[in-house]
Image (tube, rainbow, N blue to C red):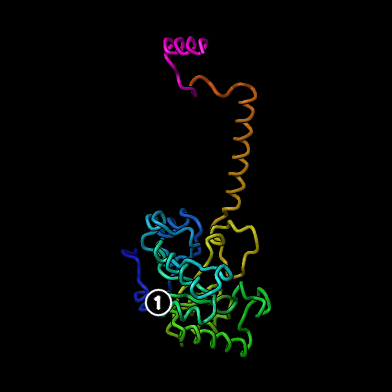
Amino acid sequence: MKSHRPTVADLLSMKGKRQLTMLRVETLDEAEAAETAGIDLVSVPPALLGPEFREVAPTCFAFPGLEYGDYVTAEEYMRAAFKALKAGGDAVYCAAGLSTVRRMREEGIPVCGHVGLIPSKATWTGGFRAVGKTAQSAFEIWRQVKALEEAGAFAAEIEVVPGDVAAAISARTSMLMLSMGAGAGCDAQYLFAADVLGSNRGHVPRHAKIYRNFAAEHDRLQRERTAAFSEFAADVRSGAYPQQRHLVGIDETELSAFLTELERA
């Protein structure tokens, strides 16, 4: 088990030595479970960060995501990045242009970029589909990786890229390569907690592995929730709730005095 939260330098020193684990978590319960399970890296919405997050996940290296399109200028990205780091983040995920990555790196902000299938820019690569299946497109991913590296990013998510391509690229860059559906030749394996837990009710990507069926449990809890609400409503209508034990009592003498004053008023 981890005894302390790793630094960027710690992570880079692990490159090529062992596979790191990474999850996208969106609640404090998920963050606490990731910490207890020994997950190395977590991607989080910036709003999740704060003292409570660090209390439940003290040793997870956290990447708050600066969502593409929420910010425009490099200054806006930097302001959001500094806010996220101050709140307990360790590095920021950023799919903005190289000039923005470079500007943040100049200020010492650790940046994780994104190559391969980038959901916010998928229109340029043919939609939500694998990228890098031809020599030309694979080399374009390599070019983007080197550009990110030169701009100062220390890591990059590589998404839905053939494993052989991703492995060759990872072996030729100093950046930490975070694989989402890009094989074991990278430095970390990254999945969404919603997929791991089976709570995702939308499209389940091919690279996802479902370990539990939380959707069925959520359905069961919803049925129980509805039943409990219905029973409460029925009790109110029938007079079964509230009972005397649900009420605050008052001494008879005090009640009598109050009612006397009320009549006078």
- What is the crowding at mark 1: few (fewer than 14 residues within 10 Å), some, or many (at least 20)? few
Name the residue beneath numbered marker 1.
Answer: 107
Residue 262 falls inside the magenta stretch: yes
Q: Position of residue 66 (x, y in %)?
A: 51, 68
Examine the rendering and report whether any part of residue 155 can be seen: yes
Query: Height in image: 32 above or below 124?
Result: above
Instruction: Identify the main secondary structure in magenta.
Output: helix
| Snapshot quadrant of residue 137 | bottom right
Q: Which residues are magenta?
A: 246-265
Asked whether, in this view, residue 134 is left or right of residue 75, the answer is right
Q: Nearer the viewer, residue 105 or 246?
A: 105
Q: Position of residue 27 (x, y in %)?
A: 49, 55
Asked whether, in this view, residue 135 is left or right of residue 249, the answer is right
Q: Nearer the viewer, residue 221 or 210?
A: 221
Q: Position of residue 13 (x, y in %)?
A: 35, 78
Q: Residue at x 47, y 75 (%)?
A: 112
Q: Residue at x 50, y 75 (%)?
A: 74
Q: Position of residue 243 (x, y in %)?
A: 53, 21
Q: Which quadrant holds the N terminus?
A: bottom left
Query: Height in image: 108 above or below 257?
Result: below
Examine the rendering and report whether any part of residue 184 can be seen: no
- Element at badge 1? loop
Query: In the rendered structure, which amino acid carries the disc numbered 1?
Result: Glu
Q: Residue at x 48, y 9 (%)?
A: 260
Residue at the extreme front: 265
| Snapshot quadrant of residue 202 | bottom right
Asked whether, in this view, residue 185 is left or right of residue 137, the answer is left
Residue 49 falls inside the magenta stretch: no
